Image (spheres, rainbow, N blue to C red):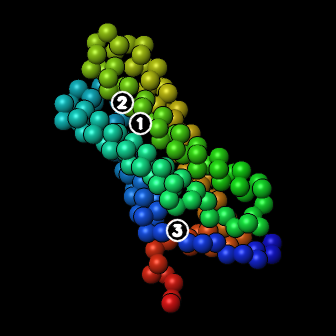
């Protein structure tokens, strides 16, 4: 594939901070999440999980609006093929929707667990939806990384570098 005629504009420091901090939060969430709803019997863990879910949701909500209103949602060059634009939009919007579903279903599980009248079928349904949302979001995150590698190794259009800290470039 030929090198694109245009190079991408770099993201600002806030976009980079939000990108990498949310990546870290998602990684933390995937690695430390509870293995069983019964673990929520521990009041400290219950409180920690709710606090984490609310913080994750708020950070992603802030990130969504920051990227839409101030930063611009894409750094694809004007000569990028339409299929790249579509896949980029699907992956990015899908990640936002996926994280929202993870947060909301997690909070619903906690609410159902704390409310004896909802503890049976409701908690089971929300747990299944939570696990589905986790799996779909993981696939979307993987596709995001693959897309970034595509831009680094094949297109060589600066998309990969647009989200890296500035210390990798010389003045």
Please name whichever residue, 37 or 112, is drawn nearer the observer in this view of the structure.
Answer: 112
* Residue behind mark 1: 103
- Mark 2 falls on what kind of element? helix
Specify few, some or many for label 3: CA neighbours under 10 Å numbering under 14, 14-19, or 20 or more: many
Quadrant assignment, res 41: top left
> Which label sits on residue 107?
2
| On screen, residue 42 above or below 66 | above
Q: Residues within 10 Å of mark 2 (few under 14, many from 20)?
A: some
Q: Residues within 10 Å of mark 1 (few under 14, many from 20)?
A: many
Q: Could you tell me if the residues under marks 2 and 3 are in contact, i.e. CB atoms within 8 Å? A: no
Distance, label 2 to label 3, CA atoms, is: 32 Å
Q: From the viewer's perspective, is the residue at label 1 or at label 3 nearer?
A: 3
Relative image position of residue 109 (x, y in whole percent): 37, 25
Tell me which corner region of the image, top left, top right, bottom left or bottom right, holds residue 118: top left
Task: Tell me residue 156's x, y (percent).
Answer: 68, 74
Residue at 71% across / 50% down in the picture? 86
Residue that label 3 marks: 11
Residue 154, can we see it?
no
Q: Secondary structure at mark 1?
A: helix
Instruction: Tell me the element at label 3.
Output: loop
Horizontal side of residue 163 vs 116, given as left or right: right
Q: How far apart are the alpha carbons under marks 1 and 2?
A: 6 Å
Does the image show residue 127? yes
**Discs 1, 2 touching: Cβ within 8 Å:** yes
Image location of residue 151, percent across then percent down = 66, 67
| Point 35% across, 39% down: residue | 53
Kindly identify which numbered label has been placed on residue 128: none
Say which quarter of the image contains residue 49. top left
Residue 129 image point, x, y percent: 50, 27
Q: Nearer the viewer, residue 157 or 31?
A: 157
Cα–Cα gap, marks 1 and 3: 27 Å
């Amino acid at each position: 594939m030929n090198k694109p005629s245009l190079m991408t504009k770099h993201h600002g420091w806030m976009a980079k901070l939000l990108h990498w901090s949310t990546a870290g939060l998602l990684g933390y969430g995937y690695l430390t999440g509870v293995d069983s709803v019964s673990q929520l019997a521990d009041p400290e863990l219950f409180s920690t999980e709710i606090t984490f879910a609310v913080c994750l949701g708020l950070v992603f909500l802030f990130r969504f609006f920051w990227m839409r209103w101030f930063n611009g949602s894409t750094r694809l060059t004007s000569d990028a093929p339409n299929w790249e634009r579509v896949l980029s939009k699907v992956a990015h919007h899908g990640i936002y929707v996926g994280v929202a579903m993870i947060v909301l279903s997690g909070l619903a599980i906690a609410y159902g667990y704390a409310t004896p009248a909802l503890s049976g079928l409701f908690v089971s349904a929300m747990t299944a939806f939570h696990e589905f949302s986790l799996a779909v979001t993981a696939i979307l995150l993987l596709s995001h990384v693959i897309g970034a590698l595509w831009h680094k190794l094949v297109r060589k259009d600066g998309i990969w570098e647009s989200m890296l800290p500035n210390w990798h470039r010389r003045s």
